[in-house]
DNA sequence: GTTCTTGCAAAATATTTGCAAGACG
DNA sequence: CGTCTTGCAAATATTTTGCAAGAAC
């Protein structure tokens, strides 16, 4: 639960990204989907926005740590809005489920990623926990 | 620890894949690397083998559950020899570490993937746990 | 001799970048 | 005006596939 609402605008202001019309559309699509989307999925959802703009917007968002990058084992990488403070970018991590039948990726928000302690010398920045299989919708 | 040695030949025989010369080379490269390799990395290691052959060999291996597919967040997907019985393909899972500086992916064999219980209706087939960050070599 | 593999080229997929024009401040 | 964004096209990257020739059994 969050004490404030997450709007495209408030997110960009918090993370220091200039909110242009296209960026608002892209972020809105991601928020409304409620699941991680790939560049191509965003492009399909927003017919009017060119993929190059989406690509550059996602780059900007990633740099500002406004969203997570998710490698789910499918063809393409997916992006998900980051529900945590800008300074401490990796505290909201949850498990994802990628359906190998329909290709969709779900957030299992209720399942946190268990902590692991890395060997000496490894500096973790980001954790990716994806379960692959068949989703309830496809089984 | 395994009671028998894992050779390209024995692995293919166990998993019912016809061992051709090229497949032996590809599997040998994967075993010798000791870390997950991408198709391109295999292509570089084996200059004499065409990437289409590698692609098809990897498909065959994947179908036979002879190797794991690993999405590590980098540009391309990586493959790793599966160290478990053919029937029960997902018992040897360990955490991986992907260095965002050098692009290499390491096996942290000593760190098992913690078990998670999925919600009703999700049928897990495969688990992907990748930590991204900077490796000891790059820091 | 039928089936599977090979090797090249071409297609398919996914994402990024060059560049000129335009919007913003 | 100077900087950042836009939109198109083209480039890049990665993997797969079509097909004819060859090897294996």
Image (cartoon, coloured by chain):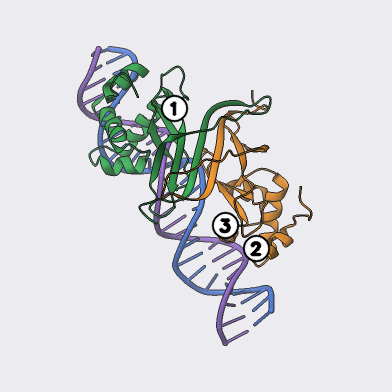
Chain colours: A orange, B green, C blue, D purple
- Distance, label 1 to label 2, CA atoms, is 40 Å
User: Percent from the top left, x then y, of residue A37?
Assistant: 62, 45
Residue in view at x 56 percent, y 41 percent: A115
Chain ID, mark 2: A
* Above or below, comparing residue B18 to residue A125 in the picture: above
**From where the camera sits, is residue B130 visible?**
yes
Q: Residues within 10 Å of mark 1 (few under 14, many from 20)?
A: few
Q: Secondary structure at mark 3?
A: helix
Is A88 or C1 nearer to us in this picture? A88
Q: Secondary structure at mark 1?
A: loop
* Above or below, comparing residue B114 to residue D10 in the picture: above
Marks 1 and 3 in Cβ contact (< 8 Å): no
Residue in view at x 35 percent, y 52 percent: B137
Select label 3 or label 2 by which is in front.
2
Q: Residue at label 1?
A: B92
Left or right: B122 with respect to B12?
right
Quadrant of the image occupied by residue B10: top left
Is B95 or B22 nearer to us in this picture? B95
Q: Which mark is residue B32?
A: none
Is A127 or A115 nearer to us in this picture? A115
Q: Secondary structure at mark 2?
A: helix
Q: Residue at label 2?
A: A15
Marks 3 and 2 in Cβ contact (< 8 Å): no
């Amino acid at each position: 639960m969050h004490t404030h609402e997450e709007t495209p605008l408030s997110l960009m202001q918090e993370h220091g990204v200039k909110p242009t019309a296209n960026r608002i559309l892209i972020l809105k699509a991601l928020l409304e989907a409620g699941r991680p989307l790939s560049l191509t999925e965003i492009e399909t959802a927003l017919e009017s926005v060119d993929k190059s703009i989406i690509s550059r917007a996602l780059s900007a968002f990633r740099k500002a740590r406004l969203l997570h990058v998710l490698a789910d084992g499918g063809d393409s990488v997916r992006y998900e809005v980051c529900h945590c403070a800008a300074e401490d970018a990796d505290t909201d991590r949850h498990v994802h489920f990628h359906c190998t039948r329909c290709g969709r990726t779900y957030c299992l928000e209720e399942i946190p990623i268990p902590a692991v302690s890395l060997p000496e010398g490894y500096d973790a920045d980001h954790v990716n926990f994806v379960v692959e299989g068949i989703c309830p919708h496809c089984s």
